[in-house]
Amino acid sequence: MNRIAIFPGSFSPFTLGHKSVVDSAIPLFNKVIIAVGINSEKNQYFLIEERMQWIESVYDNNQKIEIKRYEGLTVDFCKKENANYIIRGLRDSHDFTFEKNIAQMNKKLNPDIETIFIITPPELSHISSTILRDIIKNGGDISEFIPKEINI
Protein backbone atom coordinates (compact mmCIF):
# COMPACT_ATOMS: atom_id res chain seq x y z
CA MET A 1 0.00 0.00 0.00
CA ASN A 2 1.31 3.40 -0.98
CA ARG A 3 1.05 5.64 2.08
CA ILE A 4 1.02 9.30 1.00
CA ALA A 5 0.58 12.10 3.52
CA ILE A 6 -0.02 15.81 3.09
CA PHE A 7 1.47 18.28 5.58
CA PRO A 8 -0.42 21.49 4.78
CA GLY A 9 0.46 24.93 6.01
CA SER A 10 1.42 28.44 5.11
CA PHE A 11 4.96 27.95 6.52
CA SER A 12 5.57 31.68 6.75
CA PRO A 13 8.33 30.99 7.76
CA PHE A 14 9.14 27.25 7.95
CA THR A 15 10.27 26.68 11.54
CA LEU A 16 12.19 24.04 13.49
CA GLY A 17 8.78 22.96 14.82
CA HIS A 18 7.56 22.31 11.26
CA LYS A 19 10.78 20.44 10.53
CA SER A 20 10.35 18.24 13.60
CA VAL A 21 6.85 17.24 12.45
CA VAL A 22 8.07 16.40 8.93
CA ASP A 23 11.07 14.49 10.25
CA SER A 24 8.79 12.42 12.51
CA ALA A 25 6.44 11.68 9.58
CA ILE A 26 9.11 10.56 7.10
CA PRO A 27 9.52 6.99 8.48
CA LEU A 28 5.73 6.51 8.64
CA PHE A 29 4.92 7.22 4.98
CA ASN A 30 6.16 6.37 1.49
CA LYS A 31 5.84 10.03 0.54
CA VAL A 32 5.21 13.26 2.45
CA ILE A 33 3.96 16.20 0.43
CA ILE A 34 4.60 19.51 2.14
CA ALA A 35 1.69 21.54 0.77
CA VAL A 36 2.43 25.24 0.88
CA GLY A 37 -0.87 27.02 0.76
CA ILE A 38 -2.48 30.36 0.98
CA ASN A 39 -4.49 30.78 4.17
CA SER A 40 -6.94 33.68 3.95
CA GLU A 41 -6.82 33.97 7.75
CA LYS A 42 -3.07 34.63 7.84
CA ASN A 43 -0.90 37.49 6.70
CA GLN A 44 1.37 36.14 3.95
CA TYR A 45 4.52 38.04 4.88
CA PHE A 46 6.69 35.98 2.50
CA LEU A 47 6.05 35.09 -1.15
CA ILE A 48 4.91 31.50 -1.75
CA GLU A 49 7.89 30.90 -4.06
CA GLU A 50 10.23 32.01 -1.29
CA ARG A 51 8.59 29.69 1.26
CA MET A 52 8.74 26.74 -1.15
CA GLN A 53 12.41 27.42 -1.90
CA TRP A 54 13.26 27.44 1.82
CA ILE A 55 11.59 24.06 2.36
CA GLU A 56 13.27 22.64 -0.74
CA SER A 57 16.65 23.70 0.68
CA VAL A 58 15.92 21.78 3.90
CA TYR A 59 14.81 18.56 2.16
CA ASP A 60 16.92 18.81 -0.99
CA ASN A 61 18.27 15.25 -0.78
CA ASN A 62 15.21 13.43 0.56
CA GLN A 63 13.40 11.40 -2.09
CA LYS A 64 10.35 10.90 0.18
CA ILE A 65 9.60 14.63 0.34
CA GLU A 66 7.77 16.69 -2.28
CA ILE A 67 6.95 20.38 -1.96
CA LYS A 68 3.85 21.62 -3.76
CA ARG A 69 1.67 24.69 -3.66
CA TYR A 70 -2.06 24.45 -3.21
CA GLU A 71 -5.25 26.44 -2.78
CA GLY A 72 -8.67 25.40 -1.64
CA LEU A 73 -9.75 22.57 0.61
CA THR A 74 -7.02 20.30 1.93
CA VAL A 75 -9.22 17.23 1.38
CA ASP A 76 -9.56 18.16 -2.31
CA PHE A 77 -5.78 18.47 -2.58
CA CYS A 78 -5.42 15.07 -0.88
CA LYS A 79 -7.73 13.50 -3.44
CA LYS A 80 -5.78 15.08 -6.30
CA GLU A 81 -2.50 13.71 -4.88
CA ASN A 82 -3.94 10.27 -3.93
CA ALA A 83 -3.12 10.95 -0.28
CA ASN A 84 -5.15 9.35 2.50
CA TYR A 85 -3.45 11.12 5.39
CA ILE A 86 -3.16 14.69 6.63
CA ILE A 87 -0.36 15.45 9.08
CA ARG A 88 -0.80 18.16 11.68
CA GLY A 89 1.65 19.27 14.33
CA LEU A 90 0.53 19.97 17.87
CA ARG A 91 2.40 22.26 20.26
CA ASP A 92 -0.15 22.42 23.07
CA SER A 93 -3.77 21.80 24.09
CA HIS A 94 -4.94 24.91 22.23
CA ASP A 95 -3.56 23.48 18.98
CA PHE A 96 -5.30 20.18 19.73
CA THR A 97 -8.70 21.81 20.23
CA PHE A 98 -8.38 23.80 17.00
CA GLU A 99 -6.94 20.94 14.94
CA LYS A 100 -9.43 18.37 16.27
CA ASN A 101 -12.33 20.41 14.91
CA ILE A 102 -10.68 20.72 11.49
CA ALA A 103 -9.88 16.98 11.45
CA GLN A 104 -13.49 16.11 12.25
CA MET A 105 -14.75 18.39 9.49
CA ASN A 106 -12.27 16.93 7.01
CA LYS A 107 -13.44 13.42 8.00
CA LYS A 108 -17.02 14.47 7.30
CA LEU A 109 -16.01 15.92 3.91
CA ASN A 110 -14.00 12.82 2.98
CA PRO A 111 -14.24 9.73 5.25
CA ASP A 112 -11.25 8.10 3.48
CA ILE A 113 -8.79 10.70 4.80
CA GLU A 114 -7.29 10.27 8.24
CA THR A 115 -5.61 13.07 10.20
CA ILE A 116 -2.45 12.12 12.05
CA PHE A 117 -1.34 14.39 14.92
CA ILE A 118 2.37 14.65 15.68
CA ILE A 119 3.40 16.37 18.88
CA THR A 120 6.37 18.72 18.66
CA PRO A 121 9.18 18.29 21.19
CA PRO A 122 8.77 20.44 24.33
CA GLU A 123 11.85 22.51 23.50
CA LEU A 124 10.16 23.65 20.24
CA SER A 125 6.60 24.13 21.51
CA HIS A 126 7.00 27.89 21.98
CA ILE A 127 7.94 28.51 18.32
CA SER A 128 5.24 29.88 16.03
CA SER A 129 5.46 31.48 12.61
CA THR A 130 3.31 34.37 13.84
CA ILE A 131 5.77 35.21 16.61
CA LEU A 132 8.74 34.81 14.27
CA ARG A 133 7.20 37.22 11.75
CA ASP A 134 6.77 39.76 14.57
CA ILE A 135 10.42 39.34 15.57
CA ILE A 136 11.49 39.89 11.94
CA LYS A 137 9.27 42.97 11.55
CA ASN A 138 10.94 44.45 14.60
CA GLY A 139 14.49 43.77 13.47
CA GLY A 140 15.17 40.68 15.60
CA ASP A 141 17.14 37.55 14.76
CA ILE A 142 15.17 34.31 14.29
CA SER A 143 18.07 32.09 13.18
CA GLU A 144 17.85 29.84 16.26
CA PHE A 145 14.18 29.02 15.48
CA ILE A 146 14.47 28.03 11.81
CA PRO A 147 16.44 25.30 10.00
CA LYS A 148 20.06 26.26 9.31
CA GLU A 149 19.47 25.94 5.55
CA ILE A 150 17.10 28.92 5.60
CA ASN A 151 18.54 32.43 5.49
CA ILE A 152 16.06 35.20 6.23
Image: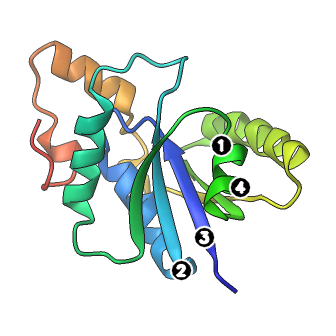
- Screen quadrant of the N terminus: bottom right
| Front residue of this view, candidates 104 and 55 | 55
Give the Cα separation between the discs numbered 2 and 3. Answer: 6 Å
Q: Secondary structure at mark 3?
A: strand
**Pointer 2 residue:** 30
The disc label shown at residue 79, or none:
4
First reached walking from the N terminus: tag 2 or tag 3: 3
Query: In the rendered image, is residue 16 in sight?
Result: yes
Figure disc tally: 4
Q: Give the Cα separation between the discs numbered 1 and 2.
A: 19 Å
Going by the numbered disc 2, the residue's amino acid type is: Asn
Other residues around mark 1 within 10 Å, as few (<14) / some (14–19) / many (≥20): some
Determine whether the residue tagged by mark 1 lies in a helix, strand or loop: helix
Q: Name the image quarter holding residue 69.
A: top left
Q: Which residue carries the number 1 mark?
A: 74
Which label sits in the foreground, 4 or 3?
Answer: 4
Residue 32 position, x and y percent, is 49, 66
Distance from disc 3 to disc 1, alpha carbons, whole Å, reads 14 Å
**Amino acid under disc 3:** Ile
Q: Earlier in the sequence, mark 2 or mark 4?
A: 2
Q: Are marks 2 and 3 in contact (CB under 8 Å)?
A: yes
Q: Are marks 1 and 2 in contact (CB under 8 Å)?
A: no
Any part of residue 123 in sight: no
**Crowd tier of the residue under label 4, counting other residues whose Cα lies within 10 Å: few below 14, some 14–19, many 20 or above:** few
Question: Of 54 and 134, which appears nearest the observer?
Answer: 54
Tell me which corner region of the image, top left, top right, bottom left or bottom right, holds residue 131. Answer: top left
